[in-house]
Amino acid sequence: MTLTEELHQSITGVLRLFRFDATALTCFGRDAAAAKRSFWAWAFAVPALTIVIWLGLIEAKPEDPGLYVAARMIAQIIEIVGFPLLMLGVAGFWERRAAWPVFVTAYNWFAMLQISLQITALSLSADGGPAVAGLVLNAVLVYTLLVEAFLAQTTLGIGRFQAISVVILDVVFGELVDNAARYVAGVPFHV
């Protein structure tokens, strides 16, 4: 399969996941090589991640903007690599290690679309003021968390409560890493 074909397959798969369609799994590679290649999905998310860091910079108003940007960039890399590695241990504990590569592959493509969807929702709702933007962003957040639980349940072959625990683990890990970056940058924690 060429890179272009794999890209098409992966985007098709993640769009199916967002419709809660279990046939999405047929679109993702199931081996370690596919999991490694899926990290290229983050290359497509760089513009969205840049916007997130820029918006955080405006909100936090740090004394040292360069340090803030560097800390947030490093935090993004830790989150991108760290959560899949954390899930390797969790998958092993649940005796689902063989399913880990397809989980990582689907997760990376899901996360790329998730961040892009959140930025799109924010930009489309910005004219409605902070209340509307907050409502739209929270709706998108809840929807994407449900999709992530479905992704975990489907790819790892686990129950709903385990899938919910994967989502909670992802959120908590992300918040810990983000708050560590904020601490390094000298800005208040985000709760």
Image (cartoon, rainbow, N blue to C red):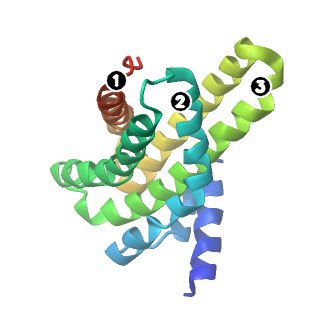
Location of mark 1 (residue): 186
The first of marks 1 and 2 along the sequence is 2
| Disc 3 residue type (three-letter) | Ala
The first of marks 1 and 3 along the sequence is 3
Work out which quarter of the rendered image holds the N terminus and state it: bottom right
Residue 160 position in % (x across, y down):
39, 36
| Disc 2 residue type (three-letter) | Gly
| Disc 1 residue type (three-letter) | Gly
Foreground mark, 1 or 3?
1
Q: Write the residue at 30% across / 26% down.
A: 183
Residue 188, placed above or below residue 54: above
Residue 2, quarter of the rendered image: bottom right
Q: Residues within 10 Å of mark 1 (few under 14, many from 20)?
A: some
Q: Is residue 139 left or right of residue 166?
A: right
Q: Write the residue at 33% across / 55% down.
A: 81
Per the model, the C-alpha gap separating discs 1 and 2 is 13 Å
Q: Write the residue at 40% across / 44% down.
A: 70
Residues marked 2 and 3 touching at CB (< 8 Å): no
| Residue nearer the viewer, 117 or 57 | 57
Kindly identify which numbered label has been placed on residue 126: 3
Which type of secondary structure does the marked residue at label 2 adopt? helix
